[in-house]
Amino acid sequence: MVPMKNEFNNTESKNNVNPSEQGSGSGAVVHKRRPRYKGTHPRKFSEKYKELNPELYPETIEKVIAKGSTPAGMHIPIAVQEILDVLAIKEGENGLDCTLGYGGHTRRMLEQLKGKGHLTSLDVDSENIVRTEGMLRKEGFGEEILSIRHINFQNLDQAAEEQGKFDFILADLGVSSMQIDEPERGFSWKHEGPLDLRLDQKSGEPASERLKELEWDELAGMLMENADEPYAEEIARTVTRAIYHKKPVETTTQLAELIREAVTSATKKDNLKKGELEDLLKKSCTRTFQALRIDINQEYEVLYNMLEKLPEVLKEGGRVAILTFHSGEDRIVKKEFKRFYKEGLFSEIAKDAIRPSKEECFRNPRARSAKLRWAVK
């Protein structure tokens, strides 16, 4: 922690130096001041220098984590030790990380390989993969030990064609905290941003366009199937009515306001206290955005396709671990693992889902909904 702080302090002092005073040689480094913002605190995410460079503020990070929150701009890998226990990675093995994300699980699995064997990491997010690969390459993980591919994990058989069958496979189905915290991605109703929700912004259509195509009953069905939303019909009617009357539903906050309107109206007769209503509103917003994200990215179809190919890309004795974050995903994984076991394709499967510890859930609230299931071929 201390070296990071000293490094940052040195950078700050250099930032106060006029670039012309640093020499005109080709090796001179020009340090730019961070952007100014109005008021005492930055409001726009692009101005929040701590969130954009959290590694430079270790003391702030520890304070936020100690309060039971996840620092904005950071992704904390979930159930790391539980995953490593299940996968039991050995030196020289060939592995697959289906969801590279910010590289948290990838790093820990590489540590287990101890410079021998190989790990292939996949990611569908074209922006995230560039950032994470850059970090991992700088840390010394070259192509000989780590291959990173822009492939949707439903096509994990393509990775097997390149590297051969795998000794271990991990699929973390959660959305990266980095994606959630970036308003321009549109994953969170808490921040103003375009209503996008695509994991790969270079393909498919954003949620704002998808909503225009749906009848109210189709949207209600999506909310119930993908998120078990109790006010699905009310929300669907309110959103589709707004779109019919040409009201803009182009941003995250515009959709969130319609959800609030629908749920508030639906619970009028319940005489809820202000705190109870706010809790309901937050949950409905979260579930609605989740349902839309699943639909936009066809996440259930992708998961089924990946699971169908699992047995054929695993070596005999190979282990697989899948981390899910909502009941729909967990039901699919549980059902398919049981089917493979009955068909003799898996020799062992988890009897029950493994949950992160209470301590981890406190330090990282985004771990609370996680469930880990495993199987052995």
Image: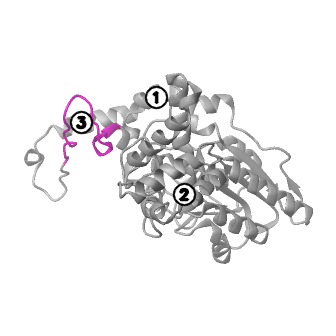
Upstream in sequence: badge 2 or badge 3: 3
Residue 1 in percent (x, y) is at 44, 32
Q: Residue 64 carries which label?
A: 1
Q: What residue occupies the far top of the structure in this picture? A: 273
Residue 286 in percent (x, y) is at 53, 43
Circle 3 sits in a helix, a strand or a loop, which is it? Answer: helix
Q: Which mark is residue 216?
A: 2
* Residue numbers of the magenta segment: 31-50
Q: Is residue 162 left or right of residue 21?
A: right
Dot 2 amino acid type: Trp
Q: Is residue 157 left or right of residue 144?
A: right
Frontmost of labels 2 and 3 is 2
Frontmost of labels 3 and 1 is 1
Residue of label 3: 12
Please identify the dominant SS of the magenta region: loop
Q: Marks 2/3: CA distance?
A: 54 Å
Residue 304 belongs to magenta span: no
Q: Would residue 128 be seen by someone viewing this image from the given angle?
A: yes
